Image: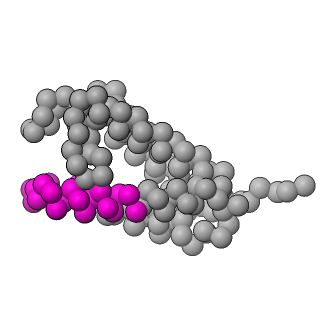
């Protein structure tokens, strides 16, 4: 009988951090969109470009779905979970680069640094165990 792989502590931490992030940021934005200085109502970013209204809410739903899939894939040590980590990291880096280039809001650059920290933390926690995903 195949024995499921033991989940490393760092992968568990990554899954829990994603759960916290999804619940705190994505779900909160989806349920009660707060107003920003540049818009009234919901706003989100798709590949570095701001979207508003229903498109923002749809993007929040997509982000939440990807986060749930990511947590499940990491928690169960699925091979596609590792590939999803790589896709999400690449998407976040590209989106962040486009956002900073297009909007050049230096007073909000801390968001860019925050996402760079998140991407690197996700990779640091999961990369050493990439071979253990089955």
Front residue of 56/6: it is 56
The residue shown at (66%, 62%) is 133
Outermost residue, bottom side: 128
Quarter of the view holding residue 20: top left
Query: In this rendering, would 77 be left or right of 83?
Result: right
Can you give x and y, in whole percent of width and height, for residue 6 in the image?
71, 60
**Image: 121 above or below 70:** below
Front residue of 16/99: it is 99
The residue shown at (38%, 58%) is 91
**Image: 66 above or below 79:** above
Query: In this rendering, would 126 be left or right of 37?
Result: right
Can you give x and y, in whole percent of width and height, for residue 103 in the image?
13, 54
Residue 99 in the magenta stretch? The answer is: yes
**Magenta range:** 90-115
Q: State whether residue 118 appears in this view.
A: no
Q: Name the quarter where the C terminus is drawn.
A: bottom right
Residue 57 in the magenta stretch? The answer is: no
Q: Taken as a whole, is the magenta stretch helix, strand or loop?
A: helix
Can you give x and y, in whole percent of width and height, for residue 61 in the image?
40, 34
Can you give x and y, in whole percent of width and height, for residue 36 in the image?
14, 37
The residue shown at (30%, 52%) is 47
Q: State whether residue 60 appears in this view.
A: yes
Number of numbered discs: 0
Query: In this rendering, would 27 be left or right of 55?
Result: right
Front residue of 82/111: it is 82
């Amino acid at each position: 009988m195949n024995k499921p792989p033991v989940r490393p502590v760092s992968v568990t931490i990554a899954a829990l951090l994603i759960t916290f992030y999804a619940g705190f940021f994505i779900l909160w934005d989806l349920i009660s969109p707060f107003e920003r200085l540049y818009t009234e109502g919901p706003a989100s970013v798709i590949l570095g470009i701001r979207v508003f209204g229903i498109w923002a809410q749809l993007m929040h739903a997509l982000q939440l779905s990807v986060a749930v899939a990511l947590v499940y894939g990491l928690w169960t040590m699925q091979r596609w979970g590792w590939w999803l980590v790589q896709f999400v990291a690449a998407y976040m880096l590209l989106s962040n680069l486009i956002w900073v280039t297009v909007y050049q809001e230096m007073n909000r650059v801390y968001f860019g640094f925050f996402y760079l920290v998140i991407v690197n933390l996700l990779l640091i926690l999961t990369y050493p165990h990439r071979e253990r995903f089955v």
